[in-house]
Amino acid sequence: MNFSWTPEQLKLKQEAIEFAQKELNENISERERNNDFPRADWKKCADFGIQGLTVPEAYGGRGVDPLTTLLIMEGLGYGCKDNGLPFSLNSQMWSFQPAILKFGSEAQKKKYLPPICRGDLVGAFGITEVESGSDSYAMQMTATEVEGGYVLNGRKSYITLAPVCDLCVIFASTDLELGRWGITAFIVEKGTKGFSTSPVRDKMGMRTTPMGDLIFEDCYIPAENILGPEGGGVSLFTTAMESERGYIFASQVGRLERQLEEAIEYAKSRQSFGQSIGKFQSVSNRIADMKLKLELGKLAMYKVAWLEENEMPLLMEAAMAKLYLSEIFVESSLDSIRIHGAKGYVTEFEIERDLRDGIGGLIYSGTSDIQRNIISRLLGL
């Protein structure tokens, strides 16, 4: 595995940093307080080419390889002070978009991927229900076959981008007695009769990433909107989750890098007891740990991309990357607060936001406990 970067790749990362710093950092504290999703910034990202990174040129994208895409998303996270917008982008790019790209018909790909790449549409990926979170396949949402299609009934809960989505990929059972083998995926467009979304839910962090419910009440979906084969929802979900788990923290890796630099700068400049606080071993060791976690986290994520590029199994590596990166983001964010002291705790300095944003990573895309279960099962336990 060779994770060295070419000058062209590093240039792309730097361009993403400069774009984010120039275009994406206005009124973040106000937007966060109001749970505002920055739709205009979403469109700016599309114009810059973010949403199209992983999509082939034939469907309006850029066709960039996974490793280079991760580097660009790192740059976006490094330059953008708001963790929510990059997370929203990663959520769509690594779950919703792969579902369409890998399982969609040619007609579906031509219809949906170009406007997704242009930023004209926002896509949500809905599987979680109130009673089926970690146990995803225990879902109770149903798809009843009727002439020409299916009627959906049920509710998907805690779905990223649900309140602002223009279309969604959702999973429902065509036969509850079949369990996971009765699950089928569907594409549902905003405005479809019987389909609605809830208001934005308040939450601890990632407040510019709207979360809510997708609601289906006798919602008729034509057969042409089935995504993949009937009963093939498990395969689609597993594939999308491998991608999401492995890569959804790409931008937070960039934020970890910037967080480390900010901690070093502060430790050098802050004086206490006649010297910079970085001279105290308790502070310097904490910063050394932040550096170690960052570098190991990068390697874990890059390995997933390398495996994908080489068409090798990546289920375990994706679970390990998600588990490790989610936990070190929380740990390093807490370290950053402790290094900055009272300044780190006070909201106006925008340091404590990382910790609030990081907590959700222990839960979404499969909790840390679920990732450990996946890893242990693959080890034969």
Image (spheres, rainbow, N blue to C red):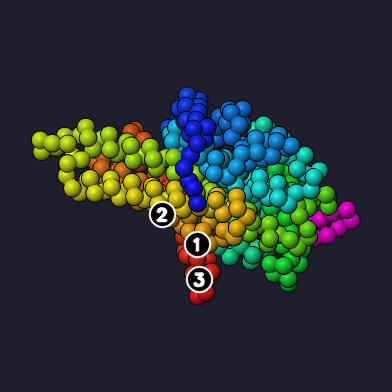
Instruction: Please report whichever mark, 1 or 2, sits nearer to the chain's N-terminal start.
Output: 2
Q: Residue furthest left?
A: 274
Q: Which residues are magenta?
A: 143-153
* Left or right of 295 on screen, residue 200: right
Q: Which mark is residue 371?
A: 1
Check disc 2 and report its element: helix, strand or loop.
helix
Distance in Å between CA atoms under marks 2 and 3: 21 Å
Q: Residues within 10 Å of mark 2 (few under 14, many from 20)?
A: some
* Left or right of 77 on screen, residue 196: right
User: In the rendered structure, which amino acid carries the disc numbered 1?
Assistant: Gln
* Left or right of 196 on screen, residue 281: left
User: In the rendered structure, which amino acid carries the disc numbered 2?
Assistant: Glu
Task: Identify whether 9 is placed above or below 314.
Answer: above
Task: Identify whether 318 is placed above or below 121.
Answer: below
**Residue placed under numbered mark 3 in the picture:** 379
**Residue placed under numbered mark 2 in the picture:** 327
